[in-house]
Amino acid sequence: MQRGWLPSTKGTTNQTTKIMDLWVGSWIAALIVGVIVWGLTIWCMIVYRRRKDETGFPAQIRYHLPLEVMYTIIPVMMVAVLFGHTASVQSDLISTDTKPDVTIGVVGKQWSWDFNYKDSDVYETGVMGQLDGNDGAEKELPTLYLPINRLVQFDLTARDVIHSFWVPAFLMKMDTVPGLENKFQVRPQRLGTFKGKCAELCGEYHSEMLFNVRVVSQADYDRHMAELEAQGNTGQLGEDLNRSEMAPSDSDAEEAGNSNALPATKTTAEVK
């Protein structure tokens, strides 16, 4: 209850605490208003109920200036305070004024993700999750590595349709739009593996557009960058690629109309 039943904890990133405080505070304010309104409503029902010996209509009041001023000013003040807090938190969430320690290009595609680690000049490409009911599907999902306590900037775009980059534990999502680069920054503050998914209905296999996020130490992050380089994943993936060029032939993506899908043992990309 203290975290508002949100899928995160305070301190997961540098932003989750302020988001949770705004969320919980808004519900507390709404609950207080609700209790007052419910109380007044019940009070009026009891005190001003019609008695058996009463006839005719009760006294009709056209207006009550002090009361009208009160129930106009108080709600306006409440909305203004809520708006102010919301605008302040939102401004912090989307601010990219600080120079990031790490910049990662995230490219959404039907129906997976590619990650360009721009500072290390390496990339990682993913294929659609194979949700066939068998265990182990998560191991095949693309995994985004983030160093702990480093300011990470995500440069978001898409190859085909609008997707939405969402890590529920970070309490932050943002659309990836073809031809447009959206950006936001976050500082992971808790080691662990988190789930990621697309939050924008993007086609038939939207539900399988999944990925993992692994927050690791700086040493483990550097080690993974070296592994990608050793695998030959150097350079950056171009935005001209599409799911047909990246999907293995035995995946559901081929059934979705990818007649030129590659054999399962291959992956390819035009590196620019």
Image: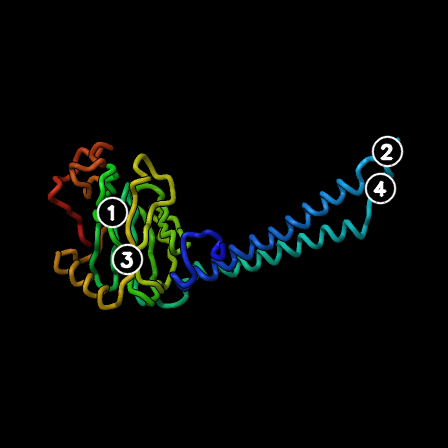
The x and y percentages for residue 232 are: 13, 56
Give the residue at x 62% y 56%.
Answer: 80
On the image, the x and y values in percent for residue 254 come to 20, 34
Helix, strand or loop under label 3? strand
- Which residue is labeled 3 in the image? 214
Q: Which mark is residue 61?
A: 4
Separation of disc 2 and disc 4 at Cα? 12 Å
Residue 97 at x, y = what percent? 41, 66
Which residue is nearer to you in this view: 251 or 43? 43
| 1 and 2 marks in contact (CB < 8 Å) | no
Q: Amino acid at mark 3?
A: Arg
Q: Residues within 10 Å of mark 2 (few under 14, many from 20)?
A: few
Residue at numbered disc 1:
138
- Say if residue 264 shows up in the picture: yes
Q: Quadrant of residue 266?
A: top left
Say whether residue 75 is left or right of residue 216: right
Q: From this viewpoint, which residue is outermost toward the front?
A: 52
Residue at image coords 22%, 49%: 139
Q: Position of residue 85 (x, y in %)?
A: 55, 59
Label 4 SS: loop
Which of disc 2 and disc 3 is earlier in sequence?
2
Q: Whole-Å distance between the Cαs marked 4 and 1?
A: 66 Å
Gap between marks 3 and 4 measured at Cα? 65 Å
Label disc, if present, on residue 57 of the rendered structure: 2
> Disc 3 to disc 2, how far (Cα)?
70 Å
